[in-house]
Amino acid sequence: MEYLRAYIAACETFGWTGGPEFSTRIVTLANGRERRNAEWPQYRNRYSLPFQNIDVESYRDIRQMFEVCRGQAGTFRYRDPLSNFADDQLIGLADDRDSYQLSTIAVRAGVTYRREVYAIPVGADFTLTADGTPIDPSDYVLDIDRGLVSFITPPTLGAELRWTGPFDVWVRFGNDWLPFSIDSRNTDTFAHNGTIDLIEMPPPPEGGSS
């Protein structure tokens, strides 16, 4: 399976929908109560991207990504317009681990949910701190495809590690068919319309395709 450090350049329009999805198995008991089992430790995002009145060059960009990925087979990057930046997010306390997984944290009423972050944009403005002090980038290696930080110079044990920066999600097409329509003509060119569905995928395996 191919993982591409590439994005669809064409701009989606109004009508965009997307967000996190969990999988919950629900069993109704004889007393009317429910037993609910969360089957996924991490949610996955789903998106529906409408494209309206785009020119032929924008359509070709979408189509080329679809062809290179061979429909649902390939994986590429997407920037979620509603969730794409971590601001001083806690990673954890420094210990004897070889690497640390980037994540974001949601907290409500004292309950915490930790969401792992995998795809960091190439050349992103990325900041890592230990107890509030920025860590020199030469002291660690950032795996931008898996969201892993590996220290060359280990931080002080027990130091609070935090990070700030943008992030993407790995996605695939939701269908093996890419239908677009020709609905109007503007001077000498046609306007193209269509919608594509995207489904979030896990990061590439270590040593795998990227």
Image: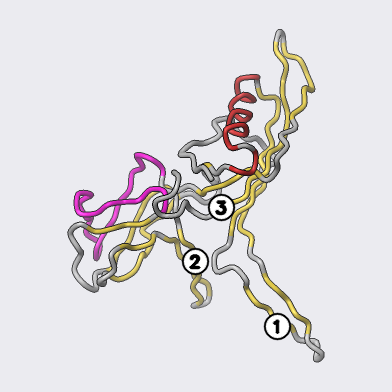
Q: Amino acid at mark 1?
A: Arg
Residue 117 image point, x, y percent: 45, 56
**Colouring of the image:** secondary structure
Q: How far apart are the alpha carbons under marks 2 and 1?
A: 24 Å
Answer few, some or many: residues within 10 Å of disc 1's Cα (few below 14, many 20 plus, some between 14 and 19): few
Residue for badge 3: 201
Q: Which residues are magenta?
A: 121-146
Q: In the rendered structure, which disc, 3 or 1, sits on the residue that comes first in sequence?
A: 1
Q: How far apart are the alpha carbons under marks 3 and 2?
A: 21 Å
- Tell me, yes or no, whether the highlighted magenta stretch contains residue 128: yes
Q: In the rendered structure, which disc, 3 or 2, sits on the residue that comes first in sequence?
A: 2
Residue for badge 2: 106
**SS category of the residue bearing label 3:** loop
In-front residue for pair 186/156:
156
Q: Is residue 187 visible?
A: yes
In-front residue for pair 70/47:
70
Answer few, some or many: residues within 10 Å of disc 3's Cα (few below 14, many 20 plus, some between 14 and 19): some
The residue under the point 49% across, 73% down is: 112
Q: How far apart are the alpha carbons under marks 3 and 1?
A: 28 Å
Residue 51 image point, x, y percent: 68, 32
Q: Is residue 78 visible?
A: no
Q: Quadrant of the C terminus?
A: top left
